[in-house]
Image: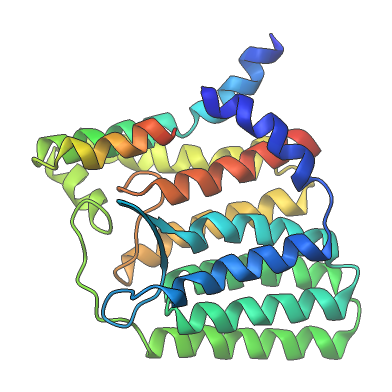
Amino acid sequence: MGSIYLIRNKEKTLSKGNFLQNVVIIALLVFPFLFNGSDGVHRWLTIGPINVYIASIILPLLIIQLWKLALNNIYAIGLYFITLIILLFHPDAGQLTAFACATTIMLWKKISNGMMKYFSLILTVTFVIMSWVFLDDLAPVPYVEDIIFLVADLGSVWFVLGILSLLLLLLSLFFYYGRKNIISLTLGVYFFMAMIVTLFGNFPLPIMGYGISPIIGYFFAISWLKKNT
Amino acid sequence: MNFLKNTLSYLVMLPAILIGTFAMVSNGVASSIWLQNIVIW
């Protein structure tokens, strides 16, 4: 509940896209490379005992920034591909795929130049394929990546409730905010894909699994939508 | 009323967090782990 108060102040800083914000966003995505990481994987900012999974906080914000910038095609596309490159080197196929799927929808709608549309699409597909080819070797943590299986082990009723609780997260983005609202739909696709990729690889299941970062990311998304739609 | 509407938007996260937390507790995950999700919410 305390976070509701905090975000009211944050919203003001989120409402205006500018160059400095984009630099900070990209810098935060690059920061994990300054830490030792784990088995060559650099996804986390280590702050004392807490590991912050920075992509899951930053990417919803970046999607919003790109949406604001999409009329300025070249700049937005440049920012988009820089992000894909960084995610490719994290490496993080799950977040890269979710981000690429979501943002492609938005850029496809916004980019007016037909050739640039197809070029962006082909390059995006290439990045997604490469990210899945060069997957990391980290073993799954049961209460992070496999949390839905732990829920299923509790019984079928819990499993159904678990799936419904995940759908609830998406429904508000797709239907409550998402009616005729492309940014909400885009954020919905991002979170939907972040859930779907967990079926195909060892990626954290957002919100339900252990991890404060996806909760913060979802929280930013909802807060911005509440304020701006 | 406005406060209730604002609050409801954030409540959508609660079922998933609580179900995940219950699964962690049932599987003996340390409280220092699962408490983080609840505290950050």
Locate residue A220, reporting x and y percent: 61, 44
Locate residue A228, reporting x and y percent: 80, 39
Residue A1 lies, with reference to residue A92, above or below; the image says: above
Q: Residue furthest front?
A: A48
Q: Is residue A142 left or right of residue A1?
A: left
Is residue A1 or residue A148 the one in the foreground?
Answer: A1
Residue B7 lies, with reference to residue A200, above or below; the image says: above
Q: Is residue A162 left or right of residue A108?
A: left
Q: Residue at x 57, y 65 (%)?
A: A28
Q: Residue at x 67, y 64 (%)?
A: A24
Q: Is residue A136 left or right of residue A92?
A: left
Residue B3: tell me if it is visible: yes
Locate residue A127, reporting x and y percent: 55, 87
Locate residue A225, reporting x and y percent: 71, 40
Residue A215 lies, with reference to residue A190, above or below; the image says: above
Q: Residue furthest top?
A: B1
